[in-house]
Amino acid sequence: MLARLDARTIALVIFAIVAATLAGAWTSQMLGYAPCELCLKQRYAYYLGLPLALAAWFATPANRRGARFLFALIALAFVANAVLAAYHTGVEFKWWPGPADCTGAYQGAGNVADFMKQLQQTRVVRCDEVSLRIFGFSLANANIFISAALAALASLAAGHVMRQG
C-alpha cells in the first residue's frame, strides 16, 4: 500500500505523524510528566521534521531535486533520532550510564545557603527513570519505532521522487 502513495502524500503523512507526536509530547508535559534532558533532545528531529515535510510537500511537483534533498534530510534526522532514542532506552534500562546532567551524582554547592537555594530552584528530571509507560513502553521506547517509521517513509518518498524524474 505504501508503494502506491506518491511523494506529496507521504510528505503530508510525515507532517501529520510529526505534528501528532509533538502534540502528544506537549500534552503529557501539560499533564505533569516533565521531560528529561534526553527527551527534550529527541524533540529536535520533530521540530526540524515539521517544516521540512511541509517544504517537501511544496517542492515535490516543481522541484524534484529539492524535494529529494528534503526527504533525505528528514530521513537522516529521524535515523539519528532513533539512535538517540535507543541510547535513552539503554539509559532507562541501566545498560549504560546516561549524561551526567540528568543521571549523574549531585555536584554539591559551596555552602549550605547555596545548597538550599539550589534545592528550591532546581527540579531535575532523571533520564534513567521512566516517568510514563504506555502499553508497557516508555516514551523513549516508542520514539525508536516512530522515528524509524518516519525515516522509512522519508526514504520511500525520496525513492519515489528519484523514479519520477
Image: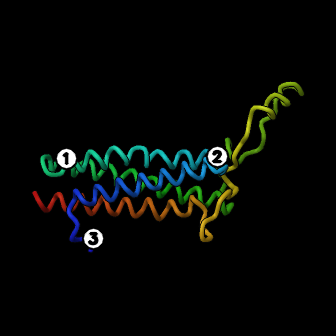
Of callouts 2 and 1, the N-terminal one = 1
Q: Amino acid at mark 1?
A: Ala
Instruction: Tell me the quarter of the picture where residue 6 sits.
Output: bottom left
Q: Is residue 31 left or right of residue 84?
A: right
Q: Residue at x 54, y 52 (%)?
A: 25
Q: Is residue 80 left or right of residue 51?
A: right
Q: Which mark is residue 2?
A: 3
Q: Residue at x 73, y 40 (%)?
A: 123
Where does residue 100 sit, x and y in percent of width and height?
68, 43
Asked if residue 153 is positioned above or below residue 64 in the image, the reply reads: below
Q: Is residue 53 left or right of residue 65?
A: right
Q: Nearer the viewer, mark 3 or mark 2?
A: 3
Where does residue 20 sit, x and y in percent of width and height?
44, 55
Q: Amino acid at mark 3?
A: Leu
In the rendered image, which residue does mark 2 sit on?
99
Q: Is there a contact, CB below 8 Å, between mark 2 and mark 1?
A: no
Observer-nearest of 17 and 41: 17
Considering the image in quadrants, where does the N terminus appear? bottom left
Q: Amino acid at mark 2?
A: Pro
Q: Which mark is residue 164?
A: none
Where does residue 33 sit, x and y in percent of width and height?
65, 51
In the rendered image, which residue does mark 1 sit on?
59
Q: Nearer the viewer, mark 2 or mark 1?
A: 1
Of callouts 3 and 2, the N-terminal one = 3
Q: Residue at x 37, y 47 (%)?
A: 50
Crowd tier of the residue under label 2, counting other residues whose Cα lies within 10 Å: few below 14, some 14–19, many 20 or above: some
